[in-house]
Each structure stands twice: as C-alpha cells, then as structure tokens.
Amino acid sequence: MTNSRNKGAAFEREIANSLNKELNLTKPLKRILEQTREKFLPDLILGNWYLECKRYGQGNEPVEKWWLQVLDSAKDRGLPALIYKFNNRPIKVRVPLYTINTNLEKNNHNTCDLSWSDFIFILKTLYSEDIESHQK
C-alpha cells in the first residue's frame, strides 16, 4: 500500500523541480515543510502564486475541497493555483480566470484548467515579475 503523505511529498518535489527547470530558476523552489503543521500554508510559493499540489489515483476532475484549500491559503495574500494529477493523466492546473485575463472580474468562482505547458507559458508571459521576485 502506498503512503499517501510520501506520494504527495514526491509530487510536490516533482512540481518544484519542474518549475525550477522550466522557469530557469537560479534560486530553487522548495517545498514549504511547515505546511504539515500550519493549516493555511500552500505546498509551494512562487512570487505571488500559492501552489497546492495534489496527486491522486483514480479520477479526472479535482475534488472541490482541494480548490477550497488553495483558496484558503492564498486568501488576501496571493494568487491560487491547484496543480493536480491523476494516474495515467497529464498534469493540470486550475486557476481563477482573472489571472489570465485582467479584464475579468476578480473572483474565485470562475476558473479554468490549463495544461502544464500552458501554465508555464502564462507564468512566463504574464507573471515574469513573480519569477523575478522569487529569484531575489
């Protein structure tokens, strides 16, 4: 039987390593270890982005409580992103629509799910200042 905590931590490391590589981060992104003790901490923070990572066996749609968890961690502090993966499926990222189009009303009810490569493109194109602030 797989230990779900170890599986989750391994996925968080995978995402951190992928972001380090894809965004050419000179200051490596690392897991927030205090998240296991403090309720409102995300798995990773990149600039203003609060990233929650979920790896699950069966399914194709994220559980609503995962989205609520990242909203709680980002509340009044940053931008929420839920990075999730199910077995035999690609990595997906759920973000509020206003993070992609600033002309849209800022709310967390309207979301979209992006492919991993689309999320990286959005970060590089629209959020280069978050990448730069992480490097400092």
Image (cartoon, rainbow, N blue to C red):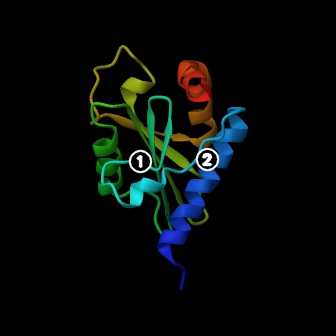
The label on residue 16 is 2
Residue count near mark 2 (Cα–Cα under 10 Å), binned few <14, some 14–19, many ≥20: many
Taking the view exactly as shown, the residue that stands out farthest to the bottom is 1
Image point (61%, 47%), residue name: 16
In the image, residue 72 above or below residue 87: above
Residue type at the position of mark 1: Pro
Which element is circle 1 on?
Answer: loop
Q: Up-down: is 67 above or below 50?
A: below
Q: In 3D space, how far apart are the residues under numbered discs 1 and 2 (Cα atoms)?
A: 13 Å
Q: Secondary structure at mark 2?
A: helix
Residue carrying label 1: 42
Q: Residue at x 28, y 44 (%)?
A: 72
Q: Is residue 88 above or below residue 106?
A: below
User: Is disc 1 in contact with disc 2, using a CB cutoff of under 8 Å?
Assistant: no
Sooner in the amino-acid sequence: mark 1 or mark 2: 2
Q: Is residue 89 left or right of residue 106?
A: right
Identity, as a three-letter code, of the amino acid under mark 2:
Ala
Q: Position of residue 9 (x, y in %)?
A: 54, 62
